[in-house]
Amino acid sequence: MKEAMPVLTAGAGLHETLALLTSQLRPDANHKEDMVFLKDVFSERSLGYLMKIHEKLRQYERQSPTPVLHSAASLAEDVADELQSGPMSTEEKELLHLLTSPHLKAVLSVHDIVAQKNFDPVLPPLPDDFEDELEEESVKIVRLVKNKEPLGATIRRDESSGAVIVARIMRGGAADRSGLVHVGDELREVNGVSVIHKRPDEISQLLSQSQGSITLKIIPAIKEEDRLKESKVYVRALFDYVPLDDKATPCQEAGLPFKRGDILQVVTQDDSTWWQAKRVGDSNLRAGLVPSKQFQERRLAYRMKMGSLPNPKSPKKPISEQGCDKEDCDCEGYFNGQYIVSPKCKAVAPSCGQVFSWEFYSAGLRRSFRLSRKDRQSSAGEGCDPGDPEYLTYEEVTRYQQRPNERPRLVVLIGSLGARINELKQRVIAENPHRYAVAVPHTTRPKKPHEKDGVEYHFVTKQQFDADVLNNKFIEHGEYKENQYGTSIEAIRSVQAKNKMCIVDVQPEALKRLRTAEFKPYVIFVKPRIPESRRRRSAATSPGGGGGGEHGRITDEDLLEMRQSAIQTDQQFGHQVDRFLIKEDSASACTELRGILERLERESFWVPLGWVRT
């Protein structure tokens, strides 16, 4: 006959239920190991004692009367005062008489005294040999299940005691998900193998080789750290990090690789040297180790001191900045968007010596009138720039979406040689002049007959221009053919005041002035698609080539200079860029830029925390 299942009575306690459950555990072929483990756990004397203590406490709670309030006498006086404040009915007079009678007042007073006292039972003092008993009973058996993943914990050898201590719990890993292993716990055994005399690398190998279930014998830390809630700190990485190349990391396998520009959620900073973080958008829920901001800055400072890292503040020799110096060349026309290069310039181009600086480099005039190196410091102004610190590590960020009542964000285009970003900007604006506009520049040159003040330029005197320079009113300025040119802060504000999105193309150095909470700029770095070989270049520049002749006739030296320009700009200012746009041709680049602008108005983006903090 089949054995009948014992039935619990209604008054059965937890320890009786536990004993019954233990007696019903029957090992089978498929789960023999699990059943034996459960039976061993449920049969522990300490667990039975805990169940009995729990029952006694619950019984005491049910039987212990709880006072409704601790100030009944004071409440009775308040009610009596309220009754005496106006005319009373017969019932109210009777109630007043009861509340003011000496006997009831005495009863309420005694009630309050009793209610305010603590009548909980007092536990007996601990026995003298308690510490010895505690040492014997404090071992904890933890069984974890990990599916082809790291345990998510690092260990260290305690220098004084020699014990193997859990040094770090990786958020989201198997150990963290269990909630049973904590920092500071002492590890005694792994799957029944003692680790007391093993080296940390041997223990790590033992842990990594264990698949499926893993059983740990642990002595809990005396003061277990409370499990911290995951923080909501987000940072943008301003450098690349490869844990396998980092000899300082406590565990290379636990490191989190990331690229410059990645958004990281820092889940804990309890270790001042190694943070735990996750990449936003990564499907892996387990956190990884990344160098903390302070630690990374110290390392960069040391490398710079030893000469293995260049000083970011040291001046860099610019790539060729020569332009067309022909007296009859009217190349300034590019600045107001009317044309990139005039027919006159094309006619004399072969004798200019550096024709590529005009015909397919957007920077011909830019690099002659804007790069006033001696004036750059005075025109830089104050800005919120993560590149301002000497070492680039992390920038704290948050999500931001433009609200209907806010001014549109500023869109800043920077580019390397050959990007022709002014042409790209003017083409997008021409398609929708009601939504997009440029900041009208200032100049000291005389106004031409067909020009209007405030349309092509703001025409000012040299004295007024110099005064504006001294007052830091320009985001950038320079001189060309003895005339001053500059783009002012007010010109940008004027466009935004009309609820239009202002698009500016500037030298990257101007980002320091523009990266402020007022403008919240979205920076786009436009780079031309540079052919890698002569064959590919020929195909790109031939009439039937895929490039459509975008680059025109260029030499190997031109390509090298374009490539160097892109690399140098990326190295110096890439950490300030929100989007990289590879320009295959004008049409596709224009379509991509238009899509970016449309998303800026309806989607949220990561911005520095200081831009939205009130």
Image (cartoon, grey):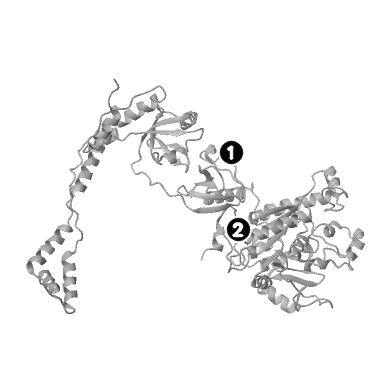
- The front one of 434 and 154 is 434
Q: Can residue 161 be seen at all in this image of the molecule?
A: yes
Q: Quarter holding the N terminus?
A: top left
Q: Is residue 439 above or below residue 125?
A: below
Q: Is residue 139 left or right of residue 474?
A: left
Nearer-N-terminus badge (2/1): 1
- The front one of 230 and 218 is 230
Report the Cα–Cα distance between label 2 and label 1.
36 Å
Q: Is residue 164 left or right of residue 96?
A: right
Residue 220: assigned label: none
Identified by mark 1, the residue type is Leu
Residue at 70% across, 56% down? 525
Where is residue 480, by image quadrant?
bottom right
Residue at 13% across, 70% down? 95
Q: Is residue 482 above or below residue 190?
A: below
Tell which tag, 2 or 1, sits nearer the viewer: 2
Question: Counting other residues with Cα less than 10 Å from the Cα at mark 2, is it few (<14), some (14-19), or many (20 or more)?
Answer: few
Residue at 74% across, 57% down? 590
- The front one of 306 and 406 is 406
> Percent from the top left, x then y, of residue 566?
73, 52
Secondary structure of the residue carrying numbered label 2: loop
Where is residue 577, by image quadrant?
bottom right
Question: Counting other residues with Cα less than 10 Å from the Cα at mark 1, is it few (<14), some (14-19), or many (20 or more)?
Answer: some
* Mark 2, residue position: 603
Q: Is residue 74 left or right of residue 131?
A: left
* Mark 1, residue position: 244
Identified by mark 2, the residue type is Glu
